[in-house]
Image (cartoon, helix red, strand yellow):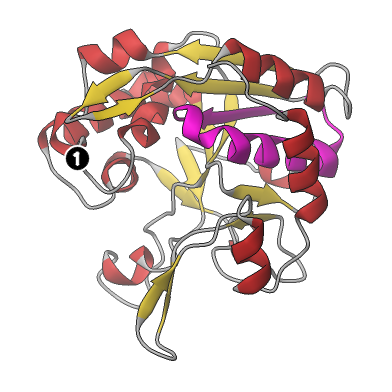
């Protein structure tokens, strides 16, 4: 199974939790691609993921399957040559958009499952990975809020959340999907840049909710995505809790399910790791 993550060193702990959860749930040999880069923009400095972290992650994954491997891919040159300039100052880190550069790395081929670093696997995801894609370039689950805001109707569910994406890299290269998405992010300012670009440009397919649960996990949840949620009580507010934030997980979500996973990751990352 091929997994893709993208970002700077800030995603390290989340990426390890996510990848290890897939390894535990599936037992399959994993090839994990880490797209990273180095950049500075408007005083914000983005530090790339280093080889030290990639080696630690690979060693951890091999506890569950000795054939697993991690490939660290530096996209600094590609990113700086063609940056998503219109969206560099968005509320999301620019390196969220690094996944749109995956087509530029020849070794990322075939079927790949992209995951955000705040996605945790609860059950074996191989049925998701083996889903028949037909003509689709990408497949995903409807975005919890975007499907209502951007689809033009409550009952339409075509606007996908991009935190979990099953991707056919060959179709993506043939159609130039990522090329066009990068161009769009470069010239058009958007609230959720690469997610919106992919929704507008891709030949896409809809997956069941269980493959990207953006609320409370259910009995059939395969992948839990810790997105920002909106709440009306006791007053209107947004709420963001990530699986590596143990205090908030316990206090706000009353959730202890991921304590052992977090503990394992913290042990692997114990002390500082070089970037």
Instruction: Using the rendered view, name the quadrant where residue 46 is placed.
Output: top left
Q: Is residue 26 located in the magenta-colored stretch of the structure?
A: yes
Image: magenta residue range: 1-29
The secondary structure that most of the magenta stretch takes on is: helix
Q: Is mark 1 on a helix, strand or loop?
A: loop
Q: Mark 1 points at which residue?
A: 89
Q: Which quadrant holds the N terminus?
A: top right
Q: Is residue 254 depicted above or below 141 in this figure? A: below
Kindly identify the residue that appears in the image at 44 percent across and 54 percent down.
161
Kindly identify the residue that appears in the image at 73 percent across and 38 percent down.
266
Q: Is residue 169 depicted above or below 156 in this figure? A: above
Q: Is residue 67 depicted above or below 251 in this figure? A: above
Q: Where is residue 245 in the image (x, y as percent from the top left)?
A: 60, 54
Q: Where is residue 5 in the image (x, y as percent from the top left)?
A: 54, 31
Q: Which residue is outermost to the front?
A: 271
Instruction: Say which of 64 and 146 sits in front.
Output: 64
Kindly identify the residue that appears in the image at 18 percent across and 34 percent down.
184
User: Within 10 Å of the Cα at label 1, are there few (<14), some (14-19), or many (20+) other Cα atoms?
Assistant: some
Q: Where is residue 116 in the image (x, y as percent from the top left)?
A: 52, 42
Q: Judge whether residue 130 can be spotted in this image.
A: no
Q: Position of residue 158 (x, y in %)?
A: 39, 60
């Amino acid at each position: 199974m091929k997994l893709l993550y993208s970002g700077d060193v800030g995603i390290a702990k989340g990426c390890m939790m996510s990848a290890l959860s897939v390894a535990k749930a599936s037992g399959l040999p994993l090839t994990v691609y880490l797209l990273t880069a180095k950049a500075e923009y408007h005083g914000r400095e983005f530090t790339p993921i280093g080889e030290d972290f990639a080696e630690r992650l690979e060693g951890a994954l091999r506890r569950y399957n000795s054939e697993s491997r991690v490939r660290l891919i530096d996209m600094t040159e590609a990113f700086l040559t063609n940056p998503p300039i219109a969206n560099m100052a968005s509320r999301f880190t620019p390196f969220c958009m690094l996944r749109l550069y995956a087509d530029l790395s020849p070794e990322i081929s075939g079927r790949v499952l992209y995951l955000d670093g705040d996605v945790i696997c609860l059950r074996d995801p191989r049925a998701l990975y083996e889903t028949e894609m037909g003509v689709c370039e990408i497949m995903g689950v409807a975005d919890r809020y975007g499907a209502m805001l951007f689809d033009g109707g409550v009952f339409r569910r075509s606007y996908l959340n991009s935190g979990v994406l099953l991707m056919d890299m060959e179709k993506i290269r043939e159609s130039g999907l990522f090329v066009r998405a990068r161009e769009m992010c470069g010239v058009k300012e958007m609230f959720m840049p690469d997610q919106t670009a992919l929704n507008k440009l891709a030949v896409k397919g809809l997956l069941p909710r269980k493959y990207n649960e953006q609320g409370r996990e259910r009995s059939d949840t395969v992948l839990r995505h810790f997105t920002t949620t909106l709440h009306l009580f006791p007053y209107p507010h947004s709420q963001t809790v990530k699986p590596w934030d143990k205090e908030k997980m316990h206090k706000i979500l009353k959730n202890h399910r991921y304590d052992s996973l977090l503990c394992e990751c913290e042990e692997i990352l114990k002390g500082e790791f070089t970037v």
